[in-house]
Amino acid sequence: MTGLLLYARSRALPAALAALAGTAAFALWAAGRLDTYVDPDRRVPIVALAPLLAAAVIGTTLYTASDELDRTAVRPWWPRRLLQLAALTALAAALLPLAVLGHPEVFGPATVIRNVLGCTGLTAAAAVLLGARLSWLPVFGYVTAVYLGSSGARGRAATVWAWPMQPGAQPGAWAAALVAFSVGAALYAVRGARVEGPRG
């Protein structure tokens, strides 16, 4: 096996790619069932939860079974980590917006892309702090809390802290999501996921 195939297999990338495709198919199916083409506000569960699921899938690939080997390798690992995270994020950002085409000013493709970036960044940061296995937990808690509690939130501050639920091209929401992605990606690229025991 070549090094690239070994790397993909050790990070469970084939399964992750299949799961991302399944997430996109599920989002597309759900959009049809919710009649989101009639009422764009019905897209809220899709634009909030589909990126969350994609970020959880990406989080599973951040695990490494050979931390000692990674740390003693001749070549630095941060470019591989960054490339892997960026490629999976780009794939999710390309697939998921297909479920919410049209009405871009409300809850359209731009909102999904923003949420994919923000959720993936939070997941990557959590992988550094908690490990890849639990990397989905903080972002799940945050997005769920915002989804359930931000319906009456208004004002400029709400566009920042409630960024997963903001429609369209809100500058504060985009800034928060981009900061989350940048910080999470940088942390993961430099540090890698927290060392965990072997997977059972």
Image: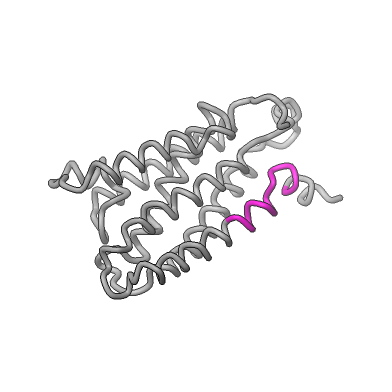
Q: Is residue 152 above or below residue 75?
A: below
Q: Residue furthest left?
A: 155
Q: Is residue 40 left or right of residue 89?
A: left
Q: Is residue 8 left or right of residue 83?
A: right
| Residue at position x 63%, y 56% in the image | 17
Quadrant position of the C terminus in the picture:
top right
Q: Position of residue 153 (x, y in %)?
A: 16, 45
Q: Is residue 79 above or below residue 70?
A: below
Q: What range of the chain is rendered magenta?
A: 8-19
Q: Position of residue 28 (x, y in %)?
A: 46, 68
**Is residue 13 magenta-colored?**
yes
Q: Is residue 51 above or below residue 134?
A: below
Q: Position of residue 65 (x, y in %)?
A: 72, 32
- Count of marks, rendered view: 0
Name the foreground residue: 75 vs 57. Answer: 57
Dominant SS in magenta: helix
| Residue at position x 42%, y 39% in the image | 139
Q: Is residue 198 left or right of residue 166?
A: right
User: Which corner quadrant of the image does residue 121 belong to?
Assistant: top left
| Residue at position x 53%, y 58% in the image | 23
Q: Position of residue 118 (x, y in %)?
A: 40, 46
Q: Residue furthest front?
A: 33
Q: Residue furthest right?
A: 1
| Residue at position x 62%, y 43% in the image | 61
Q: Is residue 166 above or below residue 66?
A: below
**Is residue 70 magenta-colored?**
no
